[in-house]
Image (cartoon, rainbow, N blue to C red):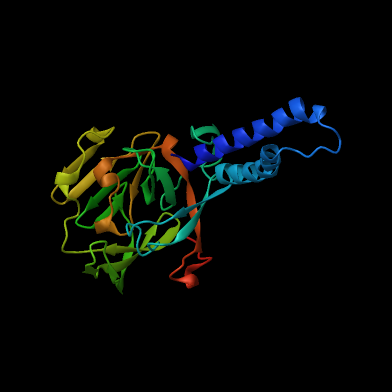
Amino acid sequence: MDFALIMFVALVVTGLIWLIDSIAFKPRRGAEAKMPILAEYAKSFFPVILAVFLLRSFLVEPFKIPSGSMLPTLLVGDFILVNKYTYGIRLPIVNLKILQVGEPKTGDVMVFRYPRDPSLDYIKRVVGVPGDTVTYRNKQLTINGQLVPEKRDGTFSYISSGLNAVNPDQYIEKLGTHTHKILIQPDTPTVYTDQVNSQFPYRQNCDYNNDGFTCKVPPGYYFMMGDNRDSSNDSRYWGFVPDQNIVGRAFMIWWNFDNPSRIGHLIE
């Protein structure tokens, strides 16, 4: 169940108990009578739950990184903070935008609801905004005909989920106003065409072959890719992310149990 929904239910329940006690029962009790334990708990927890609910819904929300698809930018086990208002104020639970504040920009690291299962939150980097033509062929990213600058920066080593040692090439990439590192495994396919979902919305906007793909991003949608380019399940395979699925922009690492030195790092 969605955590925001759990918080909302708890908020309503505690608020109703407190309200009913205040209106229906408190006037009947004597001045010295003790408040029932249930009403006392409701009165104590309601403001706390309200504060947490408002904070998570409209300001910042914490997330934990579960996979290595955003290596080396984000490590498995990083706890991050997500700005909930950068891309507009949205009603919690229904995720309906009620106030436009800003829009995702190329290079932003964004949390969103997975289009194929909105109960899951994904995090990737924005590589295409509405109207962009995104091309990724032979491990080279091109946006609107312009090659995205990148520079070799040694290698990066990590252990994959299958407990295999992986040593991809590391590059420094400049995407929009963001300069960050990406990982590329030169001996793997640019895209596994047999894993591409043939039914995602606006699939006709994309052209795939053995060298890679080209996609035209439709209005109201975004094209997302992981920084660990060859180990990321992203828009190459399941399509574009609609605006209504946006959760917010990831901006800081606030905790990592295994690597405390990462605490406080801003996400570029």
Residue occupying the far top of the picture: 24
Nearest the eye: 79 or 1: 1
Percent of width and height locating residue 222: 37, 41
Percent of width and height locating residue 127: 36, 49
Q: Which quadrant of the view contains residue 201?
A: top left
Percent of width and height locating residue 208: 17, 43
Residue 86 appears in the picture as rendered:
yes
Residue 85 appears in the picture as rendered:
no
Residue 29, compared with residue 176, is above or below; it is: above
Q: Which quadrant of the view contains residue 154?
A: bottom left
x 69%, y 44%: residue: 44
Report the label total. 0
Q: Viewed as shown, does residue 18 lie left or right of 154?
A: right
Q: Viewed as shown, does residue 101 lie left or right of 118?
A: right
Residue 137, compared with residue 266, is above or below; it is: above
x 66%, y 32%: residue: 17
Nearest the eye: 147 or 184: 184
x 78%, y 31%: residue: 26
Q: Viewed as shown, does residue 253 lie left or right of 58?
A: left
Quadrant of the image containing the C terminus: bottom left
Quadrant of the image containing the N terminus: top left
Residue occupying the far right of the picture: 31
x 49%, y 42%: residue: 3
